[in-house]
């Protein structure tokens, strides 16, 4: 078939935009951020117009999405000068919601998310290894020295930060934007395993080996180090799903959740 | 600010492929780079003087109002060279603020963090993502170098993942009052805008040229095997750009690891 007649490439141009259920997407994004601890108890969300602008949706869509979150009991809206939408503080982690979230995604979907994320960050590592100057490698090493991985929340935040810094080192604005997008969509889910102290220790050690590989221009090692961490996160996620599906707990009791 | 860079008066090839009398040299290209940055530094100097005059200590609202009137005209030109500009106060300068940013972003075509904007917007640092980054503001290149050298500085090119999500330079200049640095005035310049201004001149040279920064990172190149973003160490002829940390490589070979 002639190059200009390949159906895949041509039809992809006109593929349906991810436009359906935008209020649900807004609600899902915020729900994930709250139940997975990216947005903390008591935290005030950006204003409705600000959310509309940042998500790129209509104001009414944001209101509908926030309405869903109020019904779920995740946010409350206060009126007045100090008003706004706030994340409701809860005593226990959102276990029921977490279970629902994991049960709502199939193994094949979870696996696919990890494959997609893994390919992107492995590609970033390969490219970054070829483009990292010695001062860049030192800066990343310095950043990792200070980055806290001792608690679940800080480990999740800094894992996201690490993958973003890796994208920055590719010198590609497009890869940085894609990293921000993919983390917004899947970050809280992918980084769920960092609630496990043993796993986050292992992953922090893996991250800390990356700057030297980048500085040495060792693209094979950098790629493997990064890919291994994503693999470990995906294995934890699938194991957690299996436990939940069997009627057990998300974790094996050694996990300090959120 | 005007950067009258056109190539119409420079050489063109004749029917026989021989060059006309006005062949562009690497020295002319290097001078054009300096001229372009001199124009930006002239803006920064005028802002620096106005901020320094405002004295110390300054109330945040007064400072912001002043900086806004200074930078908005540069950000709202029809083809602005600058995509962001402002003043970042030294940690102790503004009352009650660890770090005070008076920073405005020009209109954003599309931005994964901030959405689409048609008018300049103030960079909002209340968002939580910035807190870690800004705790170390004094260690960031665009702040630390002017602080230690007392000189103007060009950082980049680098992908800015905090606000513009674009491939940029950050140009900064220290603001000093009686020997003490009270902060830096600065501006962000997109690499693509610089390219638009400089590429015609570089293409008019009779040899391939590449513009690189202090760590040999390519900014602009007329040698397709030497691409923007990669590191290009070069043993051949090099022309320095006066007053800025850039050099023009003559007939660069692709000896880098990219």
Image (tube, rainbow, N blue to C red):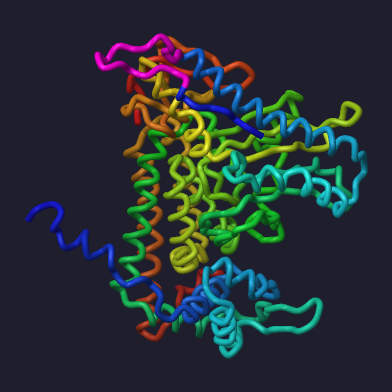
Asked whether residue B24 is drawn in magenta, I would say yes
- Residue B202 in sight in this render: yes
* Residue occupying image coordinates x 92% and y 41%: B56
The magenta-colored residue range is: B9-25
**In the depicted structure, whether residue A2 falls above or below residue B36:** below
User: Principal SS element in the magenta part?
Assistant: loop
Asked whether residue B197 is drawn in magenta, I would say no
* Residue occupying image coordinates x 39% and y 86%: A247
| Residue A19 picture location, percent across and down | 40, 75
Looking at this rendering, what residue extends furthest in the left direction?
A1
Looking at this rendering, what residue extends furthest in the front direction?
B15
User: How many discs appear?
Assistant: 0
* Residue occupying image coordinates x 35% and y 62%: A114
Q: Considering the image in quadrants, where does the N terminus of chain B appear?
A: top right
Question: Horizontally, is A125 left or right of A150 in the view?
Answer: left
Question: Horizontally, is B13 left or right of A102 in the view?
Answer: left
**In the depicted structure, whether residue A114 falls above or below residue B1:** below
Residues A150 and A160: in front is A160
Looking at this rendering, what residue extends furthest in the bottom direction?
A71
Q: Splitting the image into 4 quarters, where does residue A15 fall?
A: bottom left
Residues A108 and B33: in front is B33
Q: Considering the image in quadrants, where does the C terminus of chain B appear?
A: top left
**In the depicted structure, whether residue B54 falls above or below residue A61:** above
| Residue B81 picture location, percent across and down | 59, 39
| Residue A84 picture location, percent across and down | 71, 78
Question: Horizontally, is A117 left or right of A71 in the view?
Answer: left
* Residue occupying image coordinates x 36% and y 15%: B206
| Residue A43 picture location, percent across and down | 69, 72
- Residue A35 in sight in this render: no
Residues B133 and A51: in front is A51
């Amino acid at each position: 078939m002639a190059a200009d007649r390949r159906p895949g490439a041509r039809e992809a141009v006109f593929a349906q935009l991810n436009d359906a259920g935008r209020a649900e997407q807004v609600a899902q994004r915020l729900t994930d951020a709250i139940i997975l601890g990216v947005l903390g108890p008591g935290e005030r969300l950006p204003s409705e117009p600000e959310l509309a602008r940042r998500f790129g949706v209509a104001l009414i869509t944001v209101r509908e999405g926030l309405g869903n979150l109020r019904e779920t009991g995740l946010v409350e809206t206060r009126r007045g000068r100090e008003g706004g939408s706030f994340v409701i503080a809860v005593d226990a982690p959102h276990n029921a919601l977490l279970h629902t979230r994991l049960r709502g995604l199939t193994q094949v979907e979870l696996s696919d998310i990890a494959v997609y994320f893994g390919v992107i960050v492995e590609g970033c590592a390969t490219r970054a290894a070829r483009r990292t100057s010695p001062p860049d490698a030192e800066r990343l090493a310095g950043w990792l020295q200070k980055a806290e991985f001792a608690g679940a929340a800080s480990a999740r935040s800094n894992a996201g930060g690490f993958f973003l810094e890796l994208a920055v080192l590719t010198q590609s604005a497009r890869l940085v934007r894609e990293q921000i997008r993919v983390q917004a969509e899947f970050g809280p889910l992918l980084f769920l395993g960092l609630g496990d102290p043993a796993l986050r220790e292992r992953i922090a050690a893996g991250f800390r080996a990356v700057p030297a590989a980048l500085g040495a221009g060792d693209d094979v090692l950098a790629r493997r180090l990064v890919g291994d961490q994503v693999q470990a996160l995906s294995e934890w996620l699938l194991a957690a799903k299996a436990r939940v599906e069997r009627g057990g707990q998300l974790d094996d009791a050694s996990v300090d959740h959120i | 600010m005007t950067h009258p860079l056109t190539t119409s008066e420079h050489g063109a090839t004749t029917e026989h492929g021989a060059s006309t009398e006005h062949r562009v040299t690497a020295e002319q290209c290097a001078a054009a780079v300096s001229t372009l940055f001199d124009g930006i530094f002239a803006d920064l100097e005028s802002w620096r003087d106005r901020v320094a005059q405002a004295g110390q200590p300054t109330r945040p609202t007064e400072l912001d109002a002043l900086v806004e009137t200074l930078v908005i005209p540069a950000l709202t030109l029809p083809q602005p060279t600058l995509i962001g500009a402002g003043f970042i106060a030294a940690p102790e300068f503004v009352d009650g603020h660890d770090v005070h940013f008076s920073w405005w972003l020009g209109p954003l075509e599309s931005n994964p963090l901030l959405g689409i904007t048609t008018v300049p917007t103030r960079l909002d640092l209340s968002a939580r993502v910035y807190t870690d980054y800004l705790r170390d503001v004094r260690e960031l290149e665009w702040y630390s170098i002017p602080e230690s050298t007392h000189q103007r500085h060009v950082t980049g090119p680098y992908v800015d993942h905090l606000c513009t999500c674009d491939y940029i330079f950050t140009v900064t200049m220290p603001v000093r009052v009686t020997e003490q640095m009270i902060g830096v005035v600065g501006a962000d310049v997109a690499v693509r805008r610089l390219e638009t201004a400089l590429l015609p001149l570089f293409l008019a040279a009779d040899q391939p040229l590449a513009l690189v920064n202090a760590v040999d990172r390519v900014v602009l190149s007329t040698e397709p095997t030497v691409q923007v973003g990669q590191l290009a160490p070069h043993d051949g002829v090099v022309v320095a750009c006066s007053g800025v940390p850039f050099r023009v490589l003559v007939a660069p070979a692709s000896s880098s690891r990219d």
